[in-house]
Amino acid sequence: MSSLNLPIETDHLILRPIERSDVEAVGRYHILPSVQRYVERPTRYAEDVAAAVAVMRAQIVLHRPGDTLTLAIVRKGDKVLVGQVSLQWSNASAGQGELRFCIDPAHSGKGYLTEALTALIDLAFDHFRIHRLMARCDGRSHHSIKLMQKLGLRLEAHYREHALFQGEWDEELHFAILDREWRPSTKVVDFRPRSAAPDLPRAAI
Ligand SMILES: CC(C)(COP(=O)(O)OP(=O)(O)OC[C@H]1O[C@@H](n2cnc3c(N)ncnc32)[C@H](O)[C@@H]1OP(=O)(O)O)[C@@H](O)C(=O)NCCC(=O)NCCS
């Protein structure tokens, strides 16, 4: 595998490793109650945010299963950090990975996660040769569900009332996509053996 070239540039965003100086920007959305349930560790106070940023700063390579790559989503024009995306390599032999995402609600609805996750999925399938990617999202978050569907992920499971979050039942949806399902229109793969009969007109197949 070739070495990973960071940052990644998309039309409107830069995806780069988290930096020490990101504590304030990350803190702006991590401590919001509406975001708390989606972050891996509770970040209620400044020291929690600093600890979370320290963990994310170390998430820069996928060398072995269990490793995570976390990238800050930074707007190109003004360099404002609007959220973060992560790719975890969960299993090597079966090529499994997990996407995680979080955006500052002040910057939601602008297409940033669609753009950032598209780049991360490209990276997972093309660079890291992941076979199947899954993502978890809140069953009550209609926008997250639309985001998953827009990206082409399939709903595979709905965990009903599987956990309590601040006294409320949590509904968790699991979405997934295989490498061959990702943008099938642009990635044409011919699985037929070379000796197969010559092409028949489509309508006759
Ligand atoms: C759901 C969420 C994560 C989506 O991220 P986002 O950057 O806003 O997503 P995008 O702008 O790329 O939009 C993706 C789709 O979500 C829907 N959507 C997102 N925000 C929307 C809004 N404010 N109003 C209407 N639709 C919205 C749209 O259907 C959109 O598709 P469309 O542009 O084709 O209509 C974000 O809106 C959100 O709620 N963040 C809160 C905290 C968080 O990070 N949660 C993680 C959930 S697991």
Image (cartoon, rainbow, N blue to C red):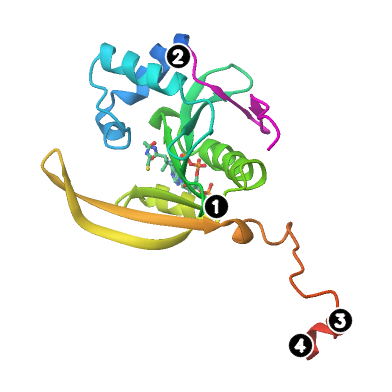
The tag earlier along the polypeptide, 2 or 4, is 2
Question: Could you tell me which secondary element the residue under label 2 belongs to?
Answer: helix
Spatial CA span between label 1 and label 4: 30 Å
Mark 2 lies on residue? 22
Q: Residue 108 or 157: which is nearer the viewer? A: 157
Where residue 37 appears, as percent x and y from the top left, is 27, 36
Question: Could you tell me which secondary element the residue under label 4 belongs to?
Answer: loop
Spatial CA span between label 2 and label 4: 56 Å
Among all residues in the image, which is located at the extreme right?
A: 198
Where residue 58 appears, as percent x and y from the top left, is 46, 21
Question: Could you tell me which secondary element the residue under label 1 belongs to?
Answer: helix
- Residue 187: which quarter of the image? bottom right
Within 10 Å of disc 2 (Cα), the crowding (few <14, some 14-19, many 20+) is some
Spatial CA span between label 2 and label 3: 56 Å
The tag earlier along the polypeptide, 1 or 4, is 1
The tag earlier along the polypeptide, 4 or 3, is 3
Please name the amino acid that badge 1 sits on. Answer: Leu
Q: Quadrant of ligand 1?
A: top left
Q: Main secondary structure of the magenta part?
A: loop
Mark 3 lies on residue? 199
Q: Which residues are magenta?
A: 1-19
Mark 4 lies on residue? 205
